[in-house]
Amino acid sequence: MVSSKSLFSAAFAGIALCAVASAQTTRLDFQRVDGPLGKVHYDVTTGKVTKVVRPGHASAKGTFANAPLAGGVQKTSVPSFNNTITTGYFTSGNLGAEFVDWATKASGLKITTAIRFGYATTVDDPSIQGPGASLDLSFYSGTTGFCVLGNETDRFTFTGLPGRTASIPVGSGAGYLITAFLGSQGICVPDGRIGWGYCMLDSDGSGGSLTGPLLTDFTTNTGWNDAFDFWAKCPANTGSCVGTFFFGGCVSPVPPPPTGTPCGSFILGLNEWTPTVTASCTARNGGTNPAVFVVTSPTVIGGNFSVAIPGLGGLAITAGPIPGFNLNGSVMGRLLCDPSVIFGGIQVVIGSLSVPIPKDVTLEGLGVCAQAALKVGSKFQLTNAQDCTFGG
């Protein structure tokens, strides 16, 4: 099977171009990975590698074809966009360039809790006193390829990644599948046309890069693409597009495709959170507080908590409800929320207010209490409370 992206007039076994390169010297390397792939777990919130299975290790063999994402605090996230079959080859290019692949996502707008991608490198591993590999991974929306980039939505920088170990010959590529757990830095990858790019950060001393993306078997995914765009500079939207490329003669470790099928797509897997708790808010009152504090958008993780009151006042979001007690000073009425912990301090409300909620799925099931106070003359009148639960 050959997708429409393979129909280039300048196709041959090696590097095929569908656009004329710019005047700059274009570096585009194509190399076989030496031996089985390794595995890496990476915690984005701390910027550290948390687990490594080295290339060639017994437990690293034969475990990568459509392997599910695993490890870390996943809640109920599942692979919703998963292409992790490697051809055994990788590519790299000019130092500071960005290679961007594209495809169609159709799993719904959810919070991504983990990303799986593949890279290979000839940089020495930290275990043999090397610096480790480095790269940027970027995401785009509206990417249709052939130098149509779309808009960048997120970018992550990875440093100190595992590299070539002593068992791999100098100059040979060590390949890894990396699962990056996002924790509180979850992202939302929209449905439709998306792109993802690799920025080349490891210098070979002559204008090229020592680290680049693993190439994948695009034919295992309907609608997957078999080419990538070469942008002269990263971020890609700060440079010019050199052209669109693919490679001929890739050999996949699992059939199909047959030997010689072109390849030019990059491994990508997205774990997206499927909530088990529905976001909700329930009004609660006491004493003679006016019941005028309403929630217009509940506590959906990654969304906005939106509220409304009739006029000027303040809002407190606290750690939880209390039975309440009456106040009769500058603040009047029955206090219904625990004042010992107020998230973000007292916030001013002029009719309405929206408070962004982090894309942190560990908030699921957490309860908070919100209460407003209306400005009445020189005093504040407490309103009803809203007892809310974070969810989807």
Image (spheres, rainbow, N blue to C red):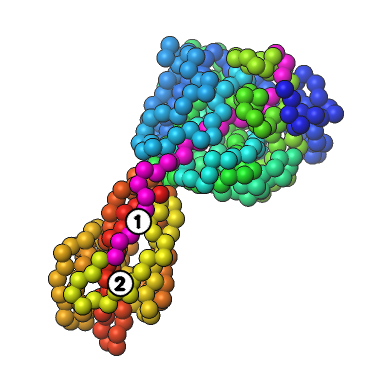
* Magenta residues, start to end: 259-283
Quadrant of res 376: bottom left
Tell me: 64 left or right of 88: left
* Residue in view at x 27 percent, y 77 percent: 290
Is 365 or 313 nearer to us in this picture?
365
- Dot in front, 2 or 1: 1
* Residue in view at x 62 percent, y 44 percent: 192
Residue 41 makes an appearance in the image: yes
Residue 210 makes an appearance in the image: no
Callout 2 environment at 10 Å: few (<14), some (14 to 19), or many (20+)?
many
* Residue in view at x 28 percent, y 54 percent: 367
Q: Position of residue 34 (x, y in %)?
A: 57, 14
Is 23 or 83 nearer to us in this picture?
83
Callout 1 environment at 10 Å: few (<14), some (14 to 19), or many (20+)?
some
Q: Position of residue 224 (x, y in %)?
A: 65, 31
Q: Position of residue 98 (x, y in %)?
A: 64, 38
Tell me: 57 left or right of 100: left
Quadrant of res 281: bottom left
Q: Earlier in the sequence, mark 2 or mark 1?
A: 1
Quadrant where the N terminus sits is: top right
What is the number of the mark on residue 140? none
What is the number of the mark on residue 280? 1
Q: Position of residue 225 (x, y in %)?
A: 68, 32
Tell me: 340 left or right of 347: left
- The residues bearing labels 2 and 1 have C-alpha atoms spaced at a distance of 18 Å
Is 22 or 84 nearer to us in this picture?
84
Asked if residue 279 lies in the magenta stretch, the reply is: yes
Query: Element at badge 2?
Result: strand
Which residue does the numbered mark 2 point to in the structure image? 372
Q: Which amino acid lies under the numbered mark 1 shown in the image of this protein?
A: Ser
Q: Which amino acid lies under the numbered mark 2 shown in the image of this protein?
A: Ala
